[in-house]
Amino acid sequence: MPRAHNGFMLWDVFCRVVDNFGDLGVCWRLSGDLATRGETVRLWVDDASALDWMAPQGAPGVELLPWTGYSVIPDPGDVVVEAFGCDPPAAFVQRMVLTSTPPVWVNLEYLSAEGYVERSHALPSPQLAGPGTGLTKWFFYPGFTPRTGGLLREPALMAQRLGFHREAWLAAHGLELRRHERLVSLFCYANPCIAALLDDLAGQPTMLLAAPGAAQSAVGGDRGGLRVHALPWLSQADYDRLLWACDLNFVRGEDSFVRAQWAGAPFVWQIYPQHDAVHAAKLDAFHERFGADPALRALSRAWNELGPWPEAWPRQDAWIAHCHRWRESLLAQEDLSTQLLGFVRSKKLK
């Protein structure tokens, strides 16, 4: 396969699936977005099984490759992206060293609102040891400010959001809201606070759409004013539309967290829990950046097992207005793929 052609590039994106689907979700969205812009992408992944439901149609311009098992390692492309410090196979990195024009090597980091992201974004990391000795790896940090790499956002996303018809989407999935019933989605890790959440949701007419996994395992059946509907695994495009359809979204990890912000509806984020509790600082940093009011901050911290369950939730009208303002502030910044393309091209010109 040729490298650069007609100004476009060949990208090698490496992804390891750790214990959930978020890493692969981000890498697939990035690969697909780059391909729609004319780039060619090889996505190397150690476990691609989730793509059977996440992206059943594949994506033009994206080739899926297994992580290992090659008798001959293919020549590297113009750009190598290792997602979240996953360390590409040593044999591939050695081929990068031997290439007459080494690829631009980018470590795409995890999303955070913490201050170090602005300080660390776009910094070089010269490789002084190991299979990549002599090369430079560049840190690329997604983020919420113009001094970061931005967020994944396809060029047509907001136009699709504007043209979305909720009733048609619900009907296509065999769903119909009752009069004065709110619609809530739940995608979560295992969480002992689900019982308290269900009690609150049951206090007014609510249809709860529970994603497969921990959500469906814990919610049980209908109660009070709460109707529960178990969702199948949804493709990424259909999950976006689920978020657009709902009045409130409970999301987890990174990929669904970002997509909830583009949806513009109220959301509550369950951050990936870490044993050393650094997730608490990451959650608080987002609260500060987002400008969460005290009621939302209390609900969010409680949902993340960092505080008591609140007696009152945020006012819905104020919550909606704030999410719309937040989305507008993000839309004023360049998206991640646009910034990444510009960054890589600037390095190739040197």
Image (tube, helix red, strand yellow):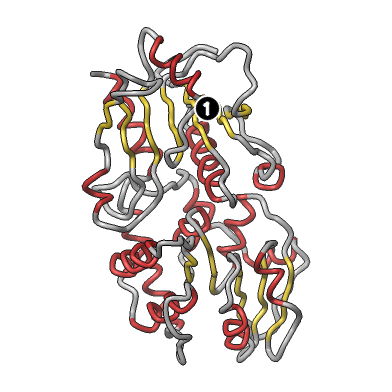
Q: Residue at x 61, y 80 (%)?
A: 182
Q: Amino acid at mark 1?
A: Val
**146 w.r.t. 122: above or below:** below
Q: Residue 222, position in %: x, y?
A: 74, 83
Q: Secondary structure at mark 1?
A: strand
Q: Residue at x 27, y 31 (%)?
A: 125
Query: Depth check: 329 or 19 in front?
Result: 19
In the shown orientation, is residue 292 left or right of residue 33? left
Q: Residue 54, position in %: x, y?
A: 65, 47
Residue at which label 1 appears = 41
Query: Depth check: 188 or 202 in front?
Result: 188
Quadrant in the picture for residue 108:
top left
Q: Residue 179, position in %: x, y?
A: 67, 85
Quadrant in the picture for the N terminus = top right
Quadrant in the picture for residue 240:
bottom right
Query: Depth check: 122 or 32 in front?
Result: 122
In the shown orientation, is residue 133 left or right of residue 184? left
Q: Residue at x 25, y 44 (%)?
A: 120
**292 w.r.t. 241: above or below:** below
